[in-house]
Image (cartoon, rainbow, N blue to C red):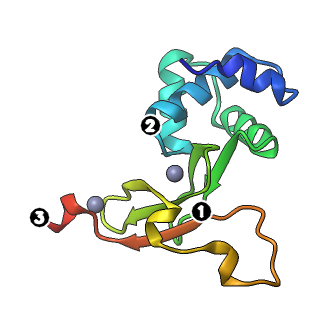
Amino acid sequence: MINYAEILKSSGLKATLQRLSILKIINTNGHITIDDLYKEMYKVNSTISLATVYKNILTMMRKSLVLEIPIIEKKSYYELKKSDHIHLICDICNSIEDKDINDLGLEINRVSNNFILSHSQLNLYGTCEECQK
Ligand SMILES: [Zn+2]
Ligand SMILES: [Zn+2]
């Protein structure tokens, strides 16, 4: 069990019920759009607005608890902050698969000696196994 209340508190944020459910929903889905997240939140609390969900996401992004995955010409997905990884994004069904960056056989430090890497986000676009059938 992940203790979301602890995670929020250690980032200096109040562990509100809304933030706790947002983190839980994102974790269950892996990667989720604001619209889908809002739909899930609405099931639990029909008085919540999309703006509130978005505001909470922004607050948690500022504290690096949540990351945005911008997708070209499509809506962004959001995920919980994990170690840096690659995304395999399907052009057809928008599914997103996490891959370890080491699977690329890339040694980031060797890419440039004159650049100090802080974090990375690498999105690879294509057709997933399911959509190839
Ligand atoms: Zn697909
Ligand atoms: Zn991911």
User: Does residue 38 appear to the left or right of 118 in the view shown?
Assistant: left
Q: Is residue 64 above or below residue 37?
A: below
Q: Is residue 30 above or below residue 14?
A: below
Which residue is the site of mark 3? 133
Nearer the N terminus, badge 1 or badge 2?
2
Image location (x, y in percent) of residue 14: 82, 20
CB within 8 Å, label 1 to label 2: no
- CA gap between label 2 and label 3 equals 24 Å
- CA gap between label 1 and label 3 equals 27 Å
Residue at 17%, 68% in the rendered image: 132
Nearer the N terminus, badge 1 or badge 3?
1
Q: Any mark on residue 124, and which?
A: none
Which residue is the site of mark 2? 29
CB within 8 Å, label 2 to label 3: no
**Residue type for callout 2:** Asn
Task: Please state, as top left, top right, bottom left or bottom right, where the C terminus lies in the image.
Answer: bottom left
Quadrant in the rendering for residue 114: bottom right
**Residue type for callout 3:** Lys
Q: Nearer the viewer, residue 44 or 78?
A: 78
Q: Is residue 86 above or below residue 63?
A: below
Image location (x, y in percent) of residue 55: 75, 38
Q: Secondary structure at mark 1?
A: loop
User: Does residue 57 appear to the left or right of 36 in the view shown?
Assistant: right
The residue carrying pointer 2 sits among few (fewer than 14), some (14 to 19) or many (20 or more) residues within 10 Å by Cα, namely few
- CA gap between label 1 and label 2 equals 17 Å
Which residue is the site of mark 1? 70
Nearer the N terminus, badge 2 or badge 3?
2
Quadrant in the rendering for residue 99: bottom left
Q: Secondary structure at mark 2?
A: helix
Q: Nearer the viewer, residue 126 or 17?
A: 126
Image location (x, y in percent) of residue 62: 81, 45
Residue at 66%, 64% in the rendered image: 120
